[in-house]
Amino acid sequence: MTTAQTQELAVQPTPLALLLLGREADPTSERGVDCPGDLPSPSDPDLVARARAAKEKLGDKVFVLGHHYQRDEVIQFADVTGDSFKLARDAAARPEAEYIVFCGVHFMAESADILTSDDQKVVLPDLAAGCSMADMATAEQVAECWDVLTEAGIAEQVVPVSYMNSSADIKAFTGKHGGTICTSSNAKRALDWAFEQGEKVLFLPDQHLGRNTAVRDMGMSLEDCVVYNPHRPNGGLTAEELRGAKMILWRGHCSVHGRFSLDSVNDVRARIPGVNVLVHPECKHEVVAAADYVGSTEYIIKALEAAPAGSKWAIGTELNLVRRLANRFAAEDKEIVFLDKTVCFCSTMNRIDLPHLVWALESLAEGTLVNRIEVDKETEAFAKLALERMLALP
């Protein structure tokens, strides 16, 4: 085969492949993606030293936030770790930090920008680090849903409650229509408040958290819940179904937590006698119903901290965190395993790797602002209103 023939057969990377490599752009994405092409090589043996040097050069000007689901190579540089809302509040509590580098995903960085001052600049090391759940509800789709509710004659009875895992646009919609935001730890309080304001709730964008909270924590039935599918006319629901429902659940889910199944629970119980099954409320209803304990990421961490030595745990949440907890508590003879046999990281969260973090920190240290996340003022105002309603919950 000639050299020319070999060149003709050479595989050319597609735009999607370049995007996944952290290059090029995705102009069709709602949030907009423009990834840098000149990243340090992942094989560079000096990456850790480079990150440390850039962070030291920036000093108090930079504050690095690390979500629990981040990989270890990134989390080692976090000034604080936590879930999305805790991190956003931590950022707001550090007004002296000019740069907030958020090692998480897009909606988290938006929340940090909403809660921090105008003088602070929020940076996301890779703009393609999105959230599949948050992307399942766009502003246009939710506006169309509200039109459907209006046509069914129930919009005035509906209070929107949006999970923290949503875009700034969805948070703003929620604020504008008298609703509130919730986290996985205060969802019941948010729903209690919402039902004091109206007769029905539109829960966005995670159907599982909404269903689990309504049925498991508030005593509703599965028949009280309907699922609105934005990809079907009228959400795939009749006006009668909408009028009869208490909980109108958006057809969205977490790609990681949605993988756990009842078979996963039954299998781990058969393999590990006496195991405690602890899952996140973003899991499917049948998984939550079969688990021994259910709670937020912070709840999971605290439960394992308080667990007796020698206890056995199967955890249904993101693998980076489960692996970190297993290593942390191994010395206390606590056996901690991933609930599912299939390895499943959060792929978008894992886009924030050490090369991206080094690139972001070195750019800031050189005086170049990169990958800033900035929410427009009108969206910020209504989103902040929804967040403030959550903060005011009893």
Image (cartoon, helix red, strand yellow):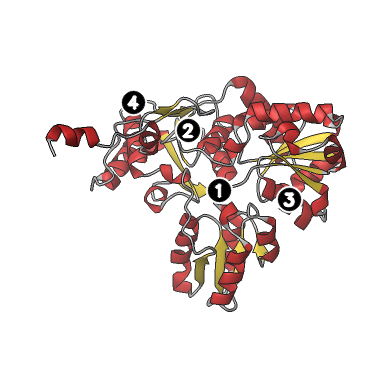
**What residue type is disc 1 on?**
Ser
Lower position in the chain sequence, tag 4 or tag 2: 2
Determine the CA span between mark 3 and mark 4: 47 Å
**What residue type is disc 3 on?**
Arg
| Foreground residue among 92 and 127 | 127
Q: Position of residue 312 (x, y in %)?
A: 55, 73
Count residues near mark 4 (Cα–Cα under 10 Å), then give few for <14, some for 14-19, many for 20+: few
Residue of label 1: 255
Determine the CA span between mark 4 and mark 1: 37 Å
Determine the CA span between mark 1 and mark 3: 17 Å
Q: Which quadrant holds the N terminus?
A: top left
Res. 323 in view: yes
Q: Position of residue 88 (x, y in %)?
A: 56, 39
**What residue type is disc 4 on?**
Gly
Quarter of the rendering containing residue 278: bottom right
Lower position in the chain sequence, tag 1 or tag 3: 3
User: Would you say the residues marked 4 and 1 are in contact, meaning their CB atoms lie under 8 Å apart?
Assistant: no
What residue is rendered at 65% in x and 57% in y? Answer: 295
Q: Position of residue 127 (x, y in %)?
A: 44, 33
**What residue type is disc 2 on?**
Glu
Determine the CA span between mark 2 and mark 3: 41 Å
Residue of label 3: 211
Determine the CA span between mark 2 and mark 1: 36 Å
Lower position in the chain sequence, tag 3 or tag 4: 3
Residue of label 2: 96
Report the mark closest to the observer, 4 or 1: 1
Residue of label 4: 367
Lower position in the chain sequence, tag 2 or tag 3: 2
Lower position in the chain sequence, tag 4 or tag 1: 1
| Foreground residue among 151 and 186 | 151
